Image (cartoon, coloured by chain):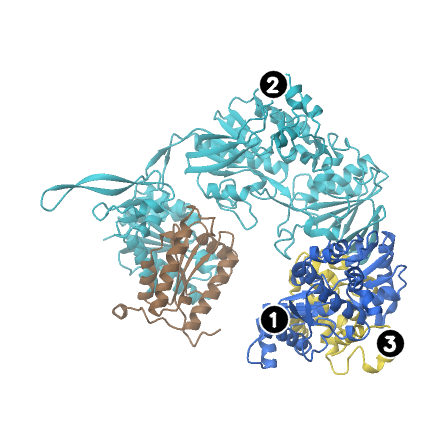
Amino acid sequence: MQRIGVFVCWCGSNIAGTVDVQAVSEALKNEPGVVFSTNYQYMCSQAGQDIIKNAIKEHKLTGMVVCSCSPRMHEATFRKTAAAAGLNSYMVEIANIREQCSWVHKDMQIGTEKAIILGKAAIAKVNLNAPLVPGESPVTKRALVIGGGIAGIQTALDIAEAGFPVDIVETKPTIGGKMAQLDKTFPTLDCAACILTPKMVDVAQNENIRIFSYSEVTEVKGFVGNFDVKIKKKARYVKEDVCTGCGLCTEKCPQKKVPNEFNLGMDNRRAIYIPFAQAVPKVATIDPNACNMLKNGKCGVCAKVCAAGAIDYKQQDEIIEEKYGAIVAATGFNPISMDKFDEYAYNQSKDVITSLEFERLTNAAGPSAGKLIRPSDGKHPHTIVFVQCVGSRCAACAEKGKEYCSKICCMYTAKHAMLTRDKYPDTEVYVFYIDVRTPGKNFDEFYRRAVEEYGVHYIKGMVGKVAPEGDKLMVQASDLLANKQLHIAADLVVLAAAIEPDKSARPLATMLTASMDTNDFFTEAHPKLRPVESPTAGIFLSGACQGPKDIPETVSQASAAAAKVIGLLCKDKLTGNPCVAHSNELMCNGCSSCERVCPYGAITYIDKEFRMPDRTTRVRRVASVNPAVCQGCGACTVACPSGAMDLNGFASKQIMAEVDAICK
Amino acid sequence: MQVKGEYKPLIVAFCCNWCSYAGADLAGNNRLNYPDNVKIIKVPCSCRVNPMFVLRAFQRGADGVILCGCHPGDCHYTSGNYYTRRRMALLFSMLNYLGIEKERTRVEWVSAAEGAKFAATMNEFTEAVAALGENKRLEDLRCKK
Amino acid sequence: MNKETENLRKEIVRISGVNPVKCMRCGKCSATCPAYDEMEYHPHQFVYMVESGDIEPLLNSKSLYQCLTCFACVDRCPRGVEPAKLVEAVRLAAVRKQGANHLKADDIPALLDEDLPQQAIVSAFRKYSK
Amino acid sequence: MKVTYFPGCTLRTKAKDLDMYARRCAEKLGVTLEEPKDWQCCGGVFTTARDEIATKLSSVRALKAAKDKEQMLVTVCSACHNVIKQTNHAMQTDADFAFRVNNYLGEDEAYHGETKVLHYLELLRDVVGFDKVKEAVVNSLAGKKIAAYYGCLLLRPSNVMKMDDSENPSIIEDLIRAIGADPVVYPYRNECCGGYIALENPESAKAKSSKVTKSAAGHGAELIVTACPLCKYNLEKNGSEIPVVYFTELLAEALGVKEEDNE
């Protein structure tokens, strides 16, 4: 028989407001096995934990139930408390009477009754708990960073600095990501390339970092500390180690009409190309969809002009297999498509552009060499209208926009408006906003400067329609403060398109078994306390793949993720989860049902000798679970026809006891 | 709406640790009400739920049993929810054969981000079960005191 | 808000199926409205005034009869508020009162034009009278 | 093939051309339009209020008639189409509304929006196919610059009408291309002509309509086509510099069924 202690937490008034905690601790006192029951204001506080520790010692407890907040919040805390007092951590069960009781019910009597039942179920379970000792597994001391934007770069550099090898996998031919496309950065207005490209060079030169560019992750197996990953290095038809990046081929290639994705299609590149001058690795790549040689075998100019002999038309995709201890997702974001917002005429006029296109237009390395011109006729625009929140904060229909605030648009729009007025004082600049959101260091001051020093017209209201008429864009908008409908004849309209996670994130999340929210952003293990970890152990999050972020925030989160990875890689061994499956060999009939459903290959069959009642021995084939590989899902326990397979911590008997307690 | 008098159906909800249990927590965080007769049992994955547990609940007087797991493709254990879906489809059809209305059982996908969906699902399921009235078919009278 | 106003507000919300609380005050409805200049109260004001219970001025305003039901605000609203449906509900609240028809059958002949399609007359009747 | 065809009141009087050419073109393209018995006026405009039952009954009766014949319901007037499609959507999605309507109609079999509602343009695009229309052309309108005027009712509310992108539609332009002419795209093709405001406030309608016609002419159009009698009235009445015709008339010309009438 267990000796169980029950600890009911008030959580201030969070629980005590709707649950009579005194009544709960009284009622649970009489449950089978319970020898001690109390309640306290904050069980998770030092004083609360002391109550637990003392009770464990004083009443020689063999098990305990804490009626408190969700186990996702403080189960770990109370397990540590128990261990500190000499009680096995796995003899602790939590009855969730906050998130699943006091917070969802309003009536004191109802809340109290439910809390008692939840407490009873937990007690019934603890009665059948057994002490568990976690196993250990080794750690592969190498990290994988997926995505080579500023987030991935920063994470990789920090991990490498700590002395661990890191691999970056980037789908594009170069690292650098979105930041490489930007002109200036807010709120200091330093040039993006000036601060990013030295970091890219650092990555290239760091001995601990390998870059797999033009590559993608195709398979992830294993678990924290022991991931097996397959990376597909796509054929770029150029030998990376031979190419010197001289760029002669990109000048001689006769196929000149390929839309240049780096400039968002605003100019053209060749079929063989280097995305931009500071690309890392600085190696040419052949676009197989555009190259005449690859399509019909007629050309070969690049091979002729390459003095280094780096061109290889016969190159094949290569699969690289590597082991990693930790994986960081840094897949970033993209602006959403403007197809569903054609009231702004993005698809009807070349002079309606997105903010990222505006960045390229004002970038000295961009398609217009930094001269602000209208894409349609190359003329200088005299009236520019910026529209904020295009597709952000849009809850009307899911296919159209995003319900969340994209966070970065207010600031970059202020930057665009300010820089335009600075360079071209003859240009009138209007910004239509719903709210100007500038929470950040020196952010609001920056926005106010745009208004007060640079004379940008900020108008509270939205644009309803952009009508291309002649060479003007007729902008129909509302000015809510003046209570007027405005009609502005603009030369250029810039849309602050909402941002969304990169499309590669969803399949990657499936491979990593990392969870995502409804917007396809990765979810964090805890929104406040564990913001850079995925709930899946060993998977970390860096940058905008977790939520919209600006550069300073991305870099801090990237470094935070790196710190978490370093903390993991520093360990020689990891303690595993003891809640794993185990087979009762006497009951196992060797049918292989469990082996077939195990997603991890944790179950193997062994031949084992058994002594029979008649004192003979017989060799039987029985299941054996590798506790280091088993993740404890329990699929095998249900598949087992003879009831031999069970799960530590979630044994069939324990769950049935909970069912019984609830249904009583 | 069709709750007659004081009758409240007893609902047992099995929630997987990674998605639905977190979804239930989120419903709590957002203070979204759902009936108190819903009692949640945490399992590591919906595939840990043995059909026996469902039968046991009915035997012991539950009026409805709901299983909640991660959305297809999002299972923390890759494929557990697919097993659940197949197993429960079989079980439910058998229950139907025994004369237990299939509306008393359900498998739902609730992600960690879907607190609102969790609460809405529980409200709706409780209402649907309440409309069927008390479940007596499988109840083991020996269990009654 | 007094009881009567509260009931009227509830009734308008019910028959329109519109929840004015969803409005985030971006003003896109008013930016998009082709009848803006003919209105005393503009679409975004309609939403806000219903939300805050300031409905009386709307009931007596000619703005009710200027909405063209072109659904531009319904389509372009980023929050799915659907202001035109709200305007319609307030208009019904006004014309359903005894003798409050905005358009009476006797008024019609004076307004007619020989080419005017029937459609215009039946539509106007539907919009302006109970 | 046979479809149920709801002409609408205006097509019987002021917009006979829209109706007549629609029938002839359909026949030429192998579709027979069958009118339901005793149809009544749709009311001209959809009342969005959820408690308006009586004004939507005639639409439901027409929809039910089509269901009984297991046909789709085709309309050519933009206004009728808008009313009937929105009513059908309400019957599908608003259970309370559908219950009350069915109660009122008192028919043996309840109606829940089973009928597929198509505009004549959708019939051409999705059932007949613009390729087939192209093959049937006898008088190519090559070189003619034609502006499509959608107005509001064909496209909005887009989540119900689901006919085309409500901000950058292409269905009429594709038809114009199919009959050999050049479509002119201009920004006000989906803005309102003023509609029934013409009755009470002709000045207001004038402002809206002339914006549309000026923009179309300014973009080089020689002709405007529309599917709505009220749009046509407003655009013409308010001094369009270029002619405004029904799209069915243009189609009839291209398919060579227009002359038959003149003989």
Chain A colour as displayed: cyan
Say which chain is yellow.
C
Kind of element beneath mark 3: loop
Q: Nearer the viewer, residue D228 or A500?
A: D228
Kind of element beneath mark 2: loop
Label 1 neighbour load within 10 Å: few <14, some 14-19, many 20+: many
Q: Which mark is residue A309?
A: 2
Query: Looking at the image, is mark 2 or mark 3 nearer the viewer?
Result: 2
- Have a look at marks 1 and 3 and say if they share a chain: no
Judging by the rendered image, the residue that carries numbered circle 1 is D91
Residue A60 is situated, as x and y percent measured from the top left of the image, at: 26, 48
User: Rounded to the nearest whole Å, what is the CA distance between mark 1 and mark 3?
Assistant: 35 Å
Judging by the rendered image, the residue that carries numbered circle 3 is C112
Question: What amino acid is at disc 3?
Answer: Leu
User: Rounded to the nearest whole Å, what is the CA distance between mark 1 and mark 2?
Assistant: 70 Å
Q: Nearer the viewer, residue D27 or A189?
A: D27
- Have a look at marks 2 and 3 and say if they share a chain: no
Disc 1: host chain: D
Question: What amino acid is at disc 2?
Answer: Gly
Chain D colour as displayed: blue
Disc 2: host chain: A
